[in-house]
Amino acid sequence: MAPAAASATDATLDAVAVGGGPAGATAATELARRGRRVVLLDRQGKPKACGGAIPPRLIEEFDIPDSVLCARVSGARVMAPSGLTVEMPIRGGFVAMVDRAVFDEWLRARAAEAGAERIAGTFESLDRDSDGTAVVVYRPADAPREAVPRRLRTRFVIGADGARSAVARQALPDIGDGAYVIAYHEIVRTPPVGRDGYDPARCDVVYRGDLSPDFYGWMFPHGDTASVGVGTARPGFALKESVRALRVLCGLADAETVRGEGAPIPLRPLKRWDNGRDVVLAGDAAGVVAPASGEGIYYAMAGGRLAAEGVDEAFDSGDPAPLARVRKRFMKAHGGVFRALGFLQGYWYASDERRERFVAICQDVDLQNMIWQSYMNKKMMRASPRVYLRIIKMNIAHMLRLV
């Protein structure tokens, strides 16, 4: 579905969602379904560098059809610096894969079908009318640079314009920039099943300091293509060279490259998501990417839905307090997972010696089941007290180098 042309009107919108990724598109869909007059402003650029993994909970919670999925993964192969390889099958479940170029457009089209107006353009600034009402200033995608920017007068603004959000910098200038991993991946054509060990139903996750000194490398299958990428927070690290080496390791050195993409990935949620008045953040703009895994699609959509609910409540009450509760609701639901994964990344990714031990721990079948169940259900899953205690003791033993 083609984006709608901008409406030439002075009427006040109920909301403008800036950014057409999973967070902004979901927020626009939810508000449109509630009868709000909402615009989805998206610059229609390259899709974000992303492995494209989504859990079953996302598919169920947000009604994602099978036609949007490009693969279902039944397990992962985890590789340590020494070459130790651990197979981690998903018992009783799966992880779905999406191509962000296809998935994000489908989400935007669904927002339009729900009643949101799509505008292709680039956010330039957040202005105020004489009565204090927010005005989103943007440049249409097809407008020449010398053209006068257009304006959208709106009651509320949802900043879903990605990491290093321009909306956040203008509406919440005191929160500063968060910490980021810079990710780069290449979408490549996949070989026939079995060639060079390629398995279209398996992810590869590589923990090696020479490929990523503080994150990891990945190969996620997307059917006819695959995402091969790495990430790091270290400035100047040679990401493209690392991806080239990773492609060799995964048997994709000679695969045709479809496209390459890079993007910052937040490491932790920002401390505040609203301006106390009429702006609330969602998705990467709010910093909601899970540490250790870098997973952001589910959390972006969950945050987009909560942002829409907050705007809807604030609209009805005339009180901006519901905007502040968006972050509280999100962290109540997911803060425990973020804290646990933050510790995992901070400790186990700190050196190759620790990465080696982490992969060795992943050989434990009970731990594998806990990891997959937690990922698929988006909450911390616990085993029986006996198993849980054994896993804790195993982790402590490795941390103290007793084994």
Image (tube, rainbow, N blue to C red):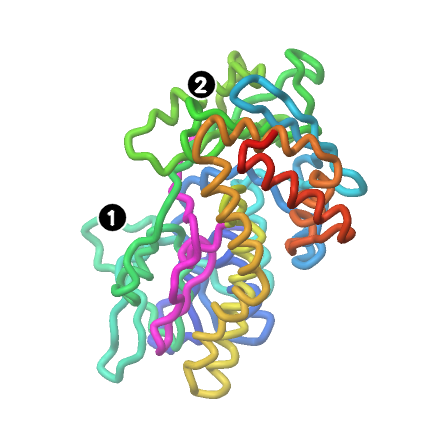
Query: Which quadrant of the structure image shows residue 74?
Result: top right
Tell me which residue sits at (52%, 43%) in the image. Answer: 344
Disc 1: CA contacts within 10 A as few (<14), some (14-19) or many (>=20): few
Residue plotted at (18% across, 51% down): 146
For the residue labelled by badge 2, is the local secondary structure a helix, a strand or a loop?
A: helix
Q: CA distance from mark 1 to mark 2?
A: 38 Å
Q: Nearer the viewer, residue 222 or 57?
A: 57
Whether residue 328 is situated above or below residue 26 in the rendered picture: below
Front: mark 1 or 2 = 2
Measured along the vertical axis of the image, is residue 162 above or below residue 82? below
Q: Position of residue 236 (x, y in %)?
A: 28, 30
Amino acid carrying mark 2 in the image? Arg
In front of the other: 222 or 267: 267
Residue that mark 1 sits on: 144
Q: What SS does tag 1 mark?
A: loop
Q: Which residues are magenta?
A: 260-289
Residue 65 can be seen in this image: no
Quadrant where the C terminus lies?
top right
Residue at horizontal 42 percent and vertical 22 percent from the top: 210
Residue placed under numbered mark 2 in the picture = 244
Q: Is residue 183 above or below residue 64?
A: above
Q: Is residue 368 magenta?
A: no
Q: Which of the pair 119/345 is nearer the observer?
A: 345
- Of residue 231 and residue 88, the one placed in the foreground of this image is 88
Type of amino acid at the residue the image marks with label 1: Pro
Residue 385 seen in this snapshot: yes
Residue 399 place in picture, x, y as percent:
54, 37
CA neighbours of label 2 inside 10 A, class few (<14), some (14 to 19), many (20+): some
Relative placement, left or right, of 163 versus 396 is left
